């Protein structure tokens, strides 16, 4: 008997919206052997050919920052039951690391990222499309706490980046992708009802494939 095609789920939303919390909460309702998460952040373009000063100018919230060609190829490989080598991005040098992560296909593939619903080629691969919709004030607070704690950023640099890059890119590219969502989850990981419904839907699809 041939192996069933994996379920592909896209989880999008603005920076700090709670995409990761939603994804993590869904994963907790299944075994590690069931769900695979592919973060769009791992697929920033390789910038090794650029001087370091130019890399510092990268707008990580713009669609052109992502290597969607590689991501799409990897999704196709996973759908065809092939192992992929997921790239690793090094934010300290602003380019792709030499390290890769071997990833094997699973029954459910969650694609998570701010612009995961922006590319029509990715949309065509998804069975379920989710947009995590959280108020801007919560998103900026969450981003500020994360960048200061995890990335050693200053408050001024976080605010400057938010005003000049994050907010304009959100309004121009991220927010419009909400129209493609099958499900909109307000307030991210705190919305337990929506997450339970998502988990139930996934389980129903899995059961139908048996």
Image (cartoon, grey):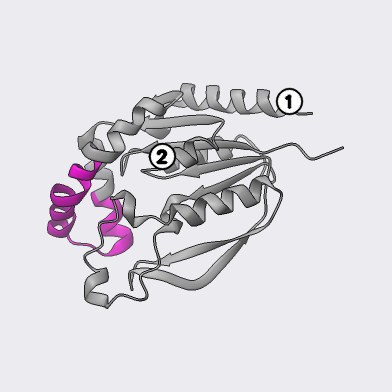
| Residue at 41% in and 54% down | 41
Q: Main secondary structure of the magenta part?
A: helix
Q: Which mark is residue 207?
A: 1
- Position of residue 150 measured from the top left corner of the image (x, y, whole percent): 33, 60
Which residue position is annotated with label 2? Answer: 19
| Residue at 48% in and 36% down | 123
Left or right of 22, for residue 31:
right
Classify mark 1: helix, strand or loop: helix
Q: Which residues are magenta?
A: 144-170
- Position of residue 185 measured from the top left corner of the image (x, y, whole percent): 40, 26
Q: Is residue 149 magenta?
A: yes
| Residue at 68% in and 40% down | 107
| In the depicted structure, whether residue 149 falls above or below residue 80 | below
Q: Quadrant of the C terminus?
A: top right
In the foreground, 54 or 152: 54
| In the depicted structure, whether residue 80 falls above or below residue 55 | above
Left or right of 49, for residue 170:
left
Q: Residues within 10 Å of mark 1 (few under 14, many from 20)?
A: few
Classify mark 2: helix, strand or loop: helix
Q: Is residue 51 at least partly visible in the picture?
A: yes
Tell me which numbered mark, 2 or 1, is placed earlier along the sequence: 2
């Amino acid at each position: 008997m041939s192996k069933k095609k994996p379920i592909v789920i896209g989880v999008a939303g603005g920076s700090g919206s709670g995409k990761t919390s939603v994804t993590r909460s869904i994963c907790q309702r299944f075994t590690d052997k069931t769900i695979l998460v592919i973060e769009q952040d791992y697929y920033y373009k390789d910038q090794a050919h650029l001087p370091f000063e130019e890399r510092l100018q990268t707008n990580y919230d713009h669609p052109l920052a992502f290597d969607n060609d590689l991501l799409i190829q990897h999704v196709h490989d996973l759908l065809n039951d092939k192992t992929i080598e997921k790239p690793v991005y090094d934010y300290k040098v602003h380019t792709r690391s030499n390290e890769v992560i071997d990833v094997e296909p699973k029954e459910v593939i969650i694609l998570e990222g701010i612009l995961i619903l922006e590319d029509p080629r990715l949309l065509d691969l998804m069975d379920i499309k989710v947009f995590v919709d959280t108020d801007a004030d919560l998103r900026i607070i969450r981003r500020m706490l994360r960048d200061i704690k995890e990335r050693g950023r200053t408050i001024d640099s976080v605010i400057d980046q938010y005003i000049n890059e994050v907010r304009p890119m959100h309004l121009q590219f991220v927010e419009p992708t909400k129209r493609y969502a099958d499900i909109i989850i307000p307030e991210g990981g705190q919305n337990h009802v929506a997450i339970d419904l998502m988990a139930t839907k996934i389980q129903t699809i899995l059961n139908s494939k048996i």
